[in-house]
Amino acid sequence: MEPPLTDTQGIKTRFAPSPTGNLHLGNVRTALYSALYAWQQNGQFLLRFEDTDQERSRPGFVQSIMSDLRWLGLDWDEGPGCGESCQEDYHQSGRAEIYQHYFDQLIEKELAYPCFCSNEQLAAIRRSQLASGQPPRYPGTCSRLSAEEVEAKRAKGIAPTLRFRVPKDEVIHFEDLLKGEQHYHCRDIGDFVIRRADGSAAFFFSNAIDDSLMGVTDVIRGEDHITNTPRQIMLLQALGLRIPRYAHTPMLLGDDGSLLSKRHGSFSVQELRGQGYLPEAVVNYLGRIGQAVDVEECLPARDLAQHFFLQKMSHSPARFDSSQMDFWQKKAVTRLDTTKALDWSRTRSMVPEAQQQQFVRLILPNILFGEDMKKWAEILYQPLEEISDAAQQVLQETDPEFFAAAVQSLDEVGEELSRFAAVLGERSGRKGRALFMPLRAALSGRLDGPSIPDLLALLGVEEAKKRMQNDRILSCPNHRK
Ligand code: GLU
């Protein structure tokens, strides 16, 4: 038996996705907590692909999961593509020999036996157990087969699964890092399948074996896996392998209150990337769900790790909240520097070089997505084509004299743009919204966005005057009278 983990042992966590779909926010949250927990303690974060289910696993999902993790800044310290490692080391499909070695050990110790029950037989047993009010559990039918009976079934060509013989009178204890002491009576757990009829290792088995062999010290995963844990502890105990610590985190629900799954397309990382969310926004939002982090700043994942304490996490499930996601997006956006912002919004070629810095500084606080920024580049640096209905309405309600007064005021203040509003206020007798909204409408064709002095600075006085004298504006019905 390997000695138990000690407190001083270096921390190693892992993310072990099955490549059967794109990453959704529930998975990312598990990956994020695992990475942050390790990095907070100068430990290692490992990536492993659990692709023993050949039918549902796809190489394309392996690529997209790795690309999403890298995009999020969750680069793994150990796993596919790191150092000298070869693909087989971290893809379970390449580790069949290792699992076979441990199947053989269990068979030799008579702790595993072949099961010939068909799916139909198992379903019938389940139905009758449920009908008589018993919990569904394998009744051990094949555990009592003699060697001759086993041979006879094999001779008929029936491919068996391999079941683990659960010790009947034991209680499995473990200390969940989040939920505290847990215990499960083995009598409530039926003998379970560890090798499928096609010879591949079942999830319970390969997952537990790999965690132990790869030196994972702390398994952090969703609480939907908590009932797997006693089974996995039994397996590791039976094989004399080291047992990691476990933490089962509350589930992340969609905004409709249902469990996030691969079906929730809109909560996939791909979808959020496509919508224009920044990786820091995703990481900082998810990192704060269900726990108070002591910094308000939007930080890259490795820096956020210094403020992350798994044990402080709430025990209740959390709902995805798009307003919080946008709150962190706003923070992430305002941290972009000129180069990054221009690349992200694809506006570099639209904005005159001398104006780029100012454009980015004044526009970033007003937008959430790169597309919005592009819109502002069009508004400011291309002929003003689009006037929103609300802006149209404001223009119709504004006398042409107001714009004449605005042009005169601009001439009067010259370079001192900060005086413009006061001078125009005096001249036109307007103030507040009545003063600013028609100006916004005329200058940008919309009623939101940067302040009037900022708009003037970005447009330049000549262009601003042109827009206020624009035929199209002056030809609004009210202006024609
Ligand atoms: N491959 C499993 C999954 O994607 C891993 C579960 C675990 O983290 O132990 O659900």
Image (spheres, grey):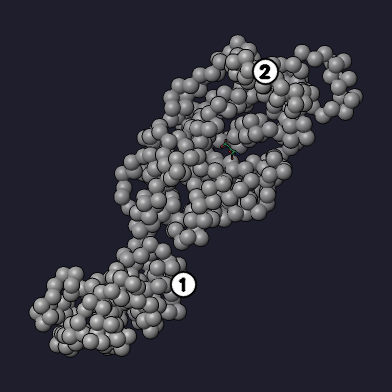
Query: Of the residues under marks 2 and 1, which one precedes in the sequence?
Result: 2
User: Which of 374/206 is in front?
Assistant: 374
Q: Residue furthest right?
A: 155
Which residue lies under the disc numbered 2?
128
**Amino acid type indicated by mark 1:** Arg
Can you give x and y, in whole percent of width and height, for residue 281 in the image? 41, 54
In percent of the image, x 49 and y 47: which residue is there? 25
Which residue lies under the disc numbered 1?
346
Label 2, label 1: how far apart the Cα atoms are: 63 Å
User: Which of 185/440 is in front?
Assistant: 440
User: Which of 41/348 is in front?
Assistant: 348
Q: Is residue 402 left or right of residue 250?
A: left
Query: Which of the 4 quarters of the picture holds residue 305?
Result: top left
Q: Is residue 353 left or right of residue 76?
A: left
Mark 1 Cα-neighbour bin, 10 Å: few <14, some 14–19, many ≥20: some
Q: Is residue 40 above or below residue 326?
A: above
**Amino acid type indicated by mark 2:** Ser
Q: Is residue 339 at all visible to an observer of this figure?
A: no
Can you give x and y, in whole percent of width and height, for residue 148 in the image? 87, 15
Query: Which of the 4 quarters of the picture holds residue 170?
Result: top right
Can you give x and y, in whole percent of width and height, for residue 166 in the image? 65, 18
